[in-house]
Amino acid sequence: MTASHHPHDESTTLDSTAHLMNRISSQLADQLSLVSLNGTRRPVPPALVLVAHGSRDPRALSTVRALVERVRELRPGLPVHLGHIELNEPRLPDTLARLGTAEAVLVPLLLARGHHVKQDIPEMAATAQARTRVAPPLGPHPLLVETLYDRLVEAGWRTRMNDQTRRASAVVLAAAGSRDPDSKLDTNRTAHLLADRLGVPVVPAYASAATPTVQAAVRALAARGRHRVAVASCFTAPGRFATQCAEQAPWLASAPLGAHPAMARLVLHRYDQTLATRDATVPELASA
């Protein structure tokens, strides 16, 4: 009996081989990037540690890991690690412990200043042997606004509107919320930047610890004749707050920021910015 031929098996083998070759090529590029033109080994740059909040939503961990991989693709040869404040592994203290006494820059995957950025992350870093600096949060920044804009367009936001549609349209910028007044200042700044980009009002609203809520912001906009309201998700990854805010959208809601290319560029910008600053232990508001 002649054995039957399965084209699918052949394509699967080819796909696996291609994936293996891509991994080998990537690893080789990482090694070559550490060697200078004269053959000497370049010094290893300070490690980049992305600091995520953590979530019980399993989508959050996979989203943050995808962002880590995108950062690695943009900067071959840079040691890139992940640590969580809570709820997910690896925890930040464990990540820092594995670095030993190496130098590292901690980039919070948080979108405004608040307790985590000002207290929790620096306190965890202070107990580690690694020589650490803490970068500012990701927002406010034009690259964050670029991501918010693209996510809205992906959700169905029209880039071209007539005057009547524009007068009826608005956006609620849904954020986690914090009791820290600096957090609200940062979110307000992001809302202003997004409003300039969209050409419609953008009202900040919060899932907890601050006002207004998303529902209250939607009602306030409706009272002003803005019935075509979208909710822009100002969350790094899916989670309970992001889901609750999206459910309040009367029209459309954008996806969390995730592993958007601009987010990866923003992470690396904060890393580079921190290395260029003498004292980055206490994060400062920076939008450039």
Image (spheres, grey):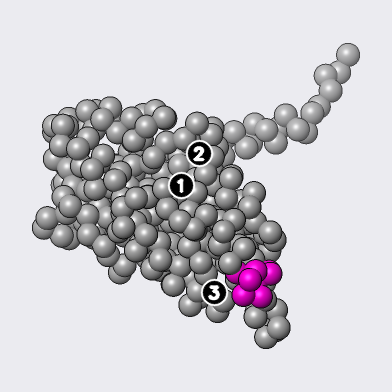
The answer to which of 149 and 209 lies nearer the viewer is 209
Q: Which amino acid does label 1 sit on?
A: Ser
Residue drawn at (23%, 43%) of the image = 119
Of the residues under marks 3 and 2, which one precedes in the sequence? 2
Residue interval drawn in magenta: 221-228
Q: Name the residue under label 2.
A: 60
Which callout, 1 or 2, points to the residue nearer the camera?
A: 1
Residue 50 visible:
yes
Residue 42 visible:
no
Of the residues under marks 1 and 3, which one precedes in the sequence? 3
Q: Is residue 288 left or right of residue 152?
A: left
Residue drawn at (70%, 36%) of the image = 11
Q: Residue 201 carries which label?
A: 3
Residue drawn at (62%, 63%) of the image = 219
Q: What residue type is labelled 2?
A: Ala
The answer to which of 53 and 20 lies nearer the viewer is 53
> Label 1 to label 2, Cα distance in Å?
19 Å
Q: What element carries label 1?
A: loop
Q: Residue furthest right?
A: 1
Q: Which amino acid does label 3 sit on?
A: Pro
Q: Name the residue under label 1.
A: 208
Q: Is residue 212 left or right of residue 123?
A: right
Q: What element carries label 3?
A: loop
> Label 3 to label 2, Cα distance in Å?
29 Å
Q: Are marks 3 and 2 in contact (CB under 8 Å)?
A: no
